[in-house]
Every structure is written in C-alpha cells, then in structure tokens.
C-alpha cells in the first residue's frame, strides 16, 4: 500500500506467514514518488525483505492493476522509471 503525502511518500507492506501471522513494515521515502513508483517500491521492499529472511515462496497481492499487468507482461512499461523497477524485480 503506497502512501503519497504532502510531506513525501512512503511504502507499507504486510507479510503473512503460512501460519497466518502478520508482520507489518513501513518506510518513508527520502524522495518524492508518484503513486506508481510508490507501488513498485512496495513490491521491491517486500521482495527484498522476504529474500533477506529466507522465504522460499512468495505470493504477492496488489491493488494496482498497472503494476500487476506490467509485472505479468500483459502491459509494456514505457516510462524509464517503470522499466528500471521491472528490471529490479526480475533480477
């Protein structure tokens, strides 16, 4: 869930364990981010966090149709910043 605000932008994720326990994380960006950039930051944050703690399988849910379709290859990312986010996710 992305949170653009007048003071800046932030990202928040909720990781749910197979046992149903939730772990919430939030960060505030030191840069101004569009809503789509904030959504991608959420995804990158979630992927890095789960990788760091050794999560073997990850299921991602998002309310951003654009991000979901770009990641799934249904939409082409045209903006350079979106292309860079996709490259981070694919690596």
Image (spheres, rainbow, N blue to C red):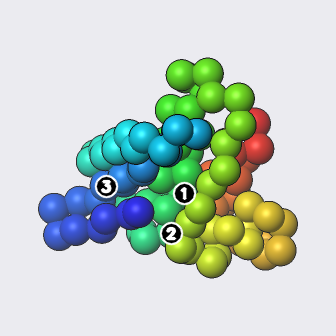
Name the quarter where the C terminus is drawn.
top right
Foreground: 81 or 66? 66
In this figure, which residue is indicated by the disc labeled 1?
40
**Mark 1 neighbour class, 10 Å CA radius: few under 14, some 14 to 19, many 20 or more:** many
Q: Position of residue 47 (x, y in %)?
A: 59, 40
Q: Is residue 78 left or right of residue 1?
A: right
Q: Position of residue 82 (x, y in %)?
A: 63, 61
1 and 2 marks in contact (CB < 8 Å): yes
Q: Is residue 85 left or right of residue 74?
A: left
Q: Which mark is residue 36?
A: 2
- Kindly report the distance in space between the C-alpha atoms of the residues bearing marks 1 and 3: 11 Å
Instruction: Quadrant for residue 55, please give it.
Output: top right
Instruction: Quadrant for residue 35, please give it.
Output: bottom left
Question: Which residue: 63% across, 68% down?
Answer: 67
Q: Is residue 11 above or below residue 24?
A: below
Quick check: can you spot residue 84?
Answer: no
Q: Is residue 23 above or below residue 53?
A: below
Question: Which residue: 36% across, 54% down?
Answer: 11
In this figure, which residue is indicated by the disc labeled 3?
10
Question: Which residue: 47% across, 52% down?
Answer: 42
Q: Which mark is residue 82?
A: none
**Mark 3 neighbour class, 10 Å CA radius: few under 14, some 14 to 19, many 20 or more:** many
- Kindly report the distance in space between the C-alpha atoms of the residues bearing marks 3 and 2: 12 Å
Question: Which residue: 22% across, 68% down?
Answer: 5
The secondary structure type at the circle numbered 2 is helix
The secondary structure type at the circle numbered 3 is strand
Q: Quick one: label 3 or label 2, which is nearer the N terminus? A: 3
1 and 3 marks in contact (CB < 8 Å): no
**Mark 2 neighbour class, 10 Å CA radius: few under 14, some 14 to 19, many 20 or more:** some
């Amino acid at each position: 869930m992305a949170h653009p605000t007048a003071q800046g932008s932030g990202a928040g994720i909720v990781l749910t364990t197979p046992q149903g326990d939730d772990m919430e994380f939030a960060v505030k960006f030191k840069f101004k981010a569009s809503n789509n950039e904030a959504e991608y930051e959420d995804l990158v944050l979630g992927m890095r966090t789960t990788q760091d703690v050794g999560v073997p399988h990850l299921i991602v849910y998002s309310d951003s149709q654009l991000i979901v379709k770009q990641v799934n290859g249904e939409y082409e990312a045209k903006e350079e910043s979106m292309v860079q986010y996709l490259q981070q996710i694919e690596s």
